[in-house]
Image (cartoon, coloured by chain):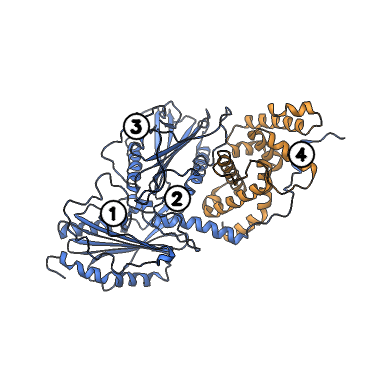
Amino acid sequence: MPERDPIQELENFTVGGPPVHTLPAAEVRRRGDRMRRRRAVALAGGAALAVAVVVAAPLALAGGGNGGGPDNREPGFATGGSTPTARAASGWLSALPDDFDLAVGYPDTNPDGSPVEVDRDISGSSLAVCGPDVPTGADRVDEAVVKYVAPAMPRSRALQLYADDAAAQAALGNLREAVAACPAPDGDGQVLTPLDWAAGDASYAWTTRSRAGSGFAPGLTVTHVVRVGNALLVATTSDQRVEGPEAVARAEHAAEDETLLAVDDMNVFAEHPGVVSPDGVTDGSDGGPGDGSDGSIATAPGADLPADFPVADGLRRAGAGDGGVVTDPSREAAGGVGVLAPCDAAAWPVTARDRLAVRSTGPEMVDARELVTFTDATEAAGVLSALRQAVESCPRQETSDGTLLLDPQEVHGLGHDHVAFFQHSDQGLGGTYWMFVRVGRAVLATSYTGETSSTTLPQLVDEQKLNTDPLVARLCRFAEAGC
Amino acid sequence: MTEEEFDDFYAASFTRIAGQLYAMVGDRDEAQECVQEAFVRAWSHRRRLDRAQSPEAWVRTTAYRLAVSRWRRTSLGRRPADRALGPATAAEPVSESHVALVAALRRLPEPQRRALVLHHVCDLPVHAVAAETGVPEGTVKARLSRGRTALAALLSDDPDLAEGATHA
């Protein structure tokens, strides 16, 4: 028998077997569009832009300490404990799903042959930023960490689950603040540079490099922080051999590609995950409220609004048979219109005297309202003015998934101080129509997310006004001179 | 990338990438599923695809990562239905030599198998294999050398050689 040439056999390798039956290209694109829209609507839903968070009190270090700083240690997480299961009554997941593969994209084994394993036995973790490690996830309800341990190319991810999206957003803000507080070195030292990157409901990313003389020493660490719903992913990707601008750019893109594999699977953590119509429109409610850590969404003690105030009058409702859900009016911003932060400038929610929030979710739309009151009309007018300025100063924002646009809308015949605009991506259908109306010291905020195009937008603007007219009329009680 | 460009890319490269992934993971059906999913993600991230130096490499890398992820979950007993890199359930290959080659590849350490496939099946030069796998060229050369030796031993009729092949 002649000797076999393995290389020749390899080079002649074919799939073999029966013919391959693939999906039609159009179906592949449809599924890709659906995945993209899910992300885009999450962005338009609001929270994508909410990253500017200030955390007054630093998180307490819950444990660990072997994470290593960027100066002379590998990036990664110091860890230590574990936790519970399922979706809490609040609607947020209270435990990480067992089948969520945090290590997606990582090799199966470390260079030393040991398996790359996800560690759920975590009591707390910290991340090297600069100086002392920054504790992360001290108030998380569940956490998992995975590391790829390679001397030249270490990688790690921590996935932390919080009680709600506001808590997760606060943790993201904590990291952002820690990075911003890192001093620029006078001479040689670590340089942290924020990246222009957007993913999930909110995100932040930066690179860490070592300055050496007039240039940089070889090596790069990219850190991505992404929030989807009440989950926060912190991923670090290092390559100690990278040198030169082109190699740095390639390494940044490769790190981003790898992180996005995990981010693509994080929709499960959205407040209303997986509600995607055949046309790909999600429930759009991924954008829950953002930061609460600095009291920005607080309601002052003492109810100003009766609990039975008809804030849900005229709200669009999907049939129960279609999976429609309408929340009861709540004083929590979490049940309201979501986060608005054009170009990362937090604009909504705001501190108010009182608040009633309601949200209707259907398979193809989300219709939400928040009625908030302030101490006086001047304060309310200031809030509207700030909103107007935030929107006008950010007509477009580049994201990794296209351009996010804010198109101001004129609402005819409203007769009250108002700000209205359509927030949408230049990729795909859908978006969110926001309308804020002030009457005296009250502001009614509304957001409608669904499949809206430039053709149908004028009709939506008119409908939203008609739907809210009766409620706006009831707000005259908050104007000193009436309406 | 326009719809037409994507459709052409998909039509021209699906079978080729699926074959390459099959050689890497040893399961034809699983390879096709992962490549299919990678193309969905490619269209979903098409701006990134435009930026990639090689869209085909982007899809192949993504498909491979998805396959590894599925295998990892299978190995943990979390997703018993998954097949990638696990016990083969593929449709029958066409020939005895094909069966032997797939079986031999499956016995190689994963880094060697991937390097061999990228270099010899995908026809990538060493520097491109290094870029796609994220290791230095010297490491790729070492893996190729050991992989060739091991593969030759596994395909040999000499049982003594085959026995020690994967220790290379």
Mark 2 vs mark 3: which is more N-terminal? 3
Screen quadrant of the N terminus of chain A: top right
Residue A268 - label = 2
Which chain is mark 1 on? A
User: Tag 4: Cα neighbours inside 10 Å, few (<14), some, or many (≥20)?
Assistant: some
Q: Colour of chain A?
A: blue
Residue named by callout 1: A333
Secondary structure type for disc 2: helix
Q: Is residue A51 visible?
A: yes
User: Tag 2: Cα neighbours inside 10 Å, few (<14), some, or many (≥20)?
Assistant: some
Residues at circles 2 and 3 in contact by the CB criterion of under 8 Å? no
Residues at circles 2 and 1 in contact by the CB criterion of under 8 Å? no
Q: Is residue B116 above or below residue A296?
A: above
Q: How far apart are marks 4 and 1 (CA)?
A: 62 Å
Name the one closer to the observer, B129 or A481.
Answer: A481
Q: The disc labelled 1 sits on which kind of residue?
A: Ala
Residue A267, how many percent across, how many down?
45, 51
Which chain is mark 4 on? B
Q: The disc labelled 4 sits on which kind of residue?
A: Ala
- Relative to A341, is B116 on the left or the right? right
Q: Is residue B168 visible?
A: no
Q: How far apart are marks 3 and 1 (CA)?
A: 29 Å
- Relative to A298, is A277 on the left or the right? right
Residue B139, how many percent across, how many down?
63, 30
Q: How far apart are marks 2 and 1 (CA)?
A: 21 Å
Q: Distance between the residues labelled 2 and 3?
A: 26 Å
Q: Is residue A457 above or below residue A102?
A: below
Q: Distance between the residues labelled 4 and 2?
A: 42 Å
- Give residue A309's quadrant in the image: bottom left
Residue A30 - label = none
Screen quadrant of the C terminus of chain A: bottom left
Residue B100 - label = 4
